[in-house]
């Protein structure tokens, strides 16, 4: 649209803007776009001496390797199960908390609860898991102390594959609900007062008001956050899972991200690891697109 | 919602009661574990082993804290984390401003293309191995640079800052300034930055807390023990049970040693979360504002 000459004079006139943005652009080229090229590793037999470009092409060999290994399906299963459970259990709570906070009669109480429930978000993952390990300790953990009070035997919770998902989800809810609630609270603040007044005058009790006025107002926010969550299903966070893994619960706790890490950086199986990682990204994108599509089809708007 | 002139119906009073109970419940569920950790860190090893601690410290001791402060690994970890946090946040803010400001200028012709260029990086990436190999190629493995540079910029923060600048700083200001012969660099430093203090504070705090709390980059890029940030040291103590013997050599009896490692763990948790949780009440309004800005943009 613009002639080359126009572009040149525009650039010369606003050279300072170009100078400013050069560094960020360079950063992304180096740290985001160059590694994208490294995705080719998934299709090659990487030889350090040959570099990525000259290493021999092997097509889908490593993808086949991944899909044919029985442990792969268990790992994918764990990832999906943990994610689905996280979303299902973790999604309603921030909404409930936000609605409750919104209806709180005392401003002081509301502020206090908000502040306290928001705080765990800032506690590091290492400390969160460290706390969980202490509480669940079979010898001195408080959970087992409580069980002892009602006459139950102490259990090594972290060693039980069956308990892994639940523990992970509970930690996530404890740490993240206060933070998510604030997002919904911000949206709830936008509910038109007139609508509320009209509902009250029409005789709607509190529950009806919440259901018919507040919830519909934050529906777009809920949908967007849900889409974002679903798009992340296959990328169960590495940091928390890795800290919670041990030899006893590994059958339930190995997920795609930790598997990619171990295969790639511990076993130096670069090509295999990149193949799994690529598969993971593609699935995530597909899920994101699907969730967005469903949202739009059902009239709920979407991310794009 | 206060409507003093309309009497509350019975069902509304009941709902209010349930809401109150629910909120108190949330408060207890969050506060109790934190209080328990604090109390356990101040209790004696014997009390911990015997399971006597419920809410308040039992048999007050500061042994755990003494052991923690004597540990040189923890001190090194703390120092490193402060270094990485300060350096990383400063670099991040500078890069974010440099990226966001030109995007707000309508005279910047490639504006939309550059924006797209940035946004794509939020959805596509090469994955762990290419990322690692790149950092290796750049010679940053096992250096402090690896803790600061690879995460120096995030497209999400650029969008936040761009939105803030575009919405908060009126275009007329720029016109007036450029008529006075003010170039872009000068306008940025003398006018935009001072007016952007709120968003800089919010992004800065989020980045700082993120750097302080993460351990992944340190895990994959660092090998030397003296470069380790606090979180990695914490991982050694809390998760891998690698308690430095010199920490507990001054204490005797095996059973006391058993209980002592647990008290040490509780003390370590308090000591490492203390900075964040003490500062938190003062800065939390910035964080809340940040979430609101992000939510509204979203």
Image (spheres, rainbow, N blue to C red):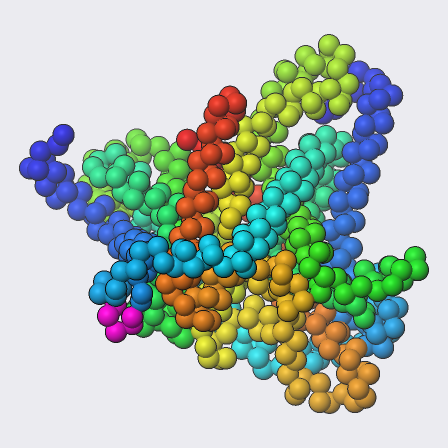
Of all residues, the one furthest to the left in this rendering is A5
Q: Residue furthest top?
A: A202
Residue at (76%, 40%) from the top-left corner? B23
The picture places residue A300, in percent across and down from the top left corner, at 52, 24
Residue B37 image-quadrant placement: bottom right
- Estimate the x, y position of residue B169 in percent, counting from the top left: 37, 36
Residue drawn at x 31%, y 41% is B115
Q: Residue at x 51, y 45 (%)?
A: A232
Residue B248 colored magenta? no
| Observer-nearest of B175 and A62 | A62
Nearest the camera: A52 or B274? A52
**Residue in the foreground of this view, choosing between B214 and B4:** B214
The quadrant of the rendering that contains the N terminus of chain B is top right
Q: Is residue B287 visible?
A: yes
Judge from the rendering whether residue A3 lies leftward or rightward of residue B276; answer left or right. left
Image location of residue B260, percent across then percent down = 76, 79
> Relative to residue A208, is residue A300 drawn left or right?
left
Q: Which residues are magenta?
A: A47-51
B239 lies above or below A107:
below
Q: Nearer the viewer, residue B174 or B143?
A: B143
Taking B116 as reference, is A133 left or right?
right
Q: Image height check: is B5 above or below A4?
A: above
Task: Inspect this view and state whether residue B192 appears.
Answer: no
Identify the main secondary structure in magenta.
Answer: loop
Residue A150 in percent (x, y) is at 92, 57
- Image quadrant where residue A218 sits: top right
As drawn, B231 above or below A91: below
């Amino acid at each position: 649209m613009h002639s080359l000459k126009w572009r040149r004079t525009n650039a010369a006139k606003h050279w300072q803007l170009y100078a400013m943005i050069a560094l960020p652009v360079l950063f992304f080229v180096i740290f985001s776009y160059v590694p994208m090229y490294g995705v080719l590793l998934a299709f090659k037999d990487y030889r350090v001496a040959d570099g990525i470009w000259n290493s021999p092409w092997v097509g889908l060999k490593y993808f086949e390797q991944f899909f044919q290994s029985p442990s792969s399906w268990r790992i994918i299963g764990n990832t999906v199960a943990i994610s689905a459970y996280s979303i299902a259990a973790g999604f309603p709570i921030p909404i409930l908390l936000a609605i409750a906070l919104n209806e709180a009669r005392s401003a002081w109480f509301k502020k206090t609860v908000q502040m306290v429930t928001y705080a765990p978000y800032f506690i590091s993952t290492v400390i969160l898991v460290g706390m969980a390990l202490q509480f669940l300790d079979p010898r001195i953990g408080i959970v087992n102390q409580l069980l002892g009070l009602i006459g139950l035997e102490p259990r090594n919770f972290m060693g039980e594959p069956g308990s892994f998902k639940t523990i992970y989800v509970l930690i996530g809810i404890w740490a993240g609900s206060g933070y998510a609630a604030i997002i919904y609270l911000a949206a709830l603040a936008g509910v038109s007062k007139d609508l509320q007044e009209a509902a009250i005058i029409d005789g709607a009790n509190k529950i009806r008001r919440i259901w018919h006025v507040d919830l519909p107002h934050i529906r777009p926010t809920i949908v967007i956050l849900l889409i974002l969550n679903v798009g992340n299903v296959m990328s169960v966070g590495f940091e928390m899972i890795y800290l919670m893994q041990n030899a006893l619960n590994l059958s339930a706790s190995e997920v795609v991200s930790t598997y990619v890490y171990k295969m790639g950086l511990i076993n130096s199986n670069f090509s295999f690891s990149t193949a799994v990682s690529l598969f993971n990204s593609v699935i995530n994108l597909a899920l994101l697109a699907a969730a967005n599509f469903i949202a739009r089809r059902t009239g709920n708007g979407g991310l794009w | 919602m206060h409507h003093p002139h309309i009497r509350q119906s019975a069902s509304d009073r009941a709902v209010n009661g349930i809401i109150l109970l629910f909120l108190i419940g949330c408060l207890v569920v969050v506060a109790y574990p934190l209080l328990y950790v604090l109390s356990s860190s101040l209790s004696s090893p014997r009390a911990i082993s015997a399971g006597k601690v419920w809410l308040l410290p039992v048999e007050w001791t500061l042994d755990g804290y003494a052991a923690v402060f004597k540990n040189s690994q923890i001190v090194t970890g703390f120092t490193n984390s402060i270094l990485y946090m300060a350096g990383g946040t400063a670099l991040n803010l500078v890069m974010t401003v440099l990226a966001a400001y030109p995007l707000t200028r309508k005279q910047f012709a490639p504006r939309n293309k550059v924006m797209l260029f940035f946004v794509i990086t939020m959805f596509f990436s090469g994955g762990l191995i290419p990322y690692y190999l790149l950092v290796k190629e750049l010679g940053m493995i096992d250096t402090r640079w690896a803790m600061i540079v690879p995460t120096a910029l995030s497209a999400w923060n650029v969008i936040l800052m761009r939105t803030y600048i575009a919405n908060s700083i009126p275009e007329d200001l720029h016109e007036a300034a450029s008529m006075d012969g003010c170039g872009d660099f000068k306008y940025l430093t003398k006018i935009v930055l001072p007016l952007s203090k709120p968003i800089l504070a919010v992004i800065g705090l989020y980045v700082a807390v993120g750097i302080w709390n993460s351990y992944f980059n340190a895990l994959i890029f660092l090998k030397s023990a003296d470069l380790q940030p606090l979180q990695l040291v914490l991982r050694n103590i809390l998760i891998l049970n690698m308690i430095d013997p010199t920490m507990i050599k001054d204490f005797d009896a095996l059973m006391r040693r058993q209980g002592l490692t647990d008290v040490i763990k509780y003390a370590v948790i308090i000591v490492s979360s203390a900075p964040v949780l003490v500062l938190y009440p003062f800065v939390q309004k910035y964080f809340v504002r940040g979430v609101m800005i992000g939510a509204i943009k979203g």
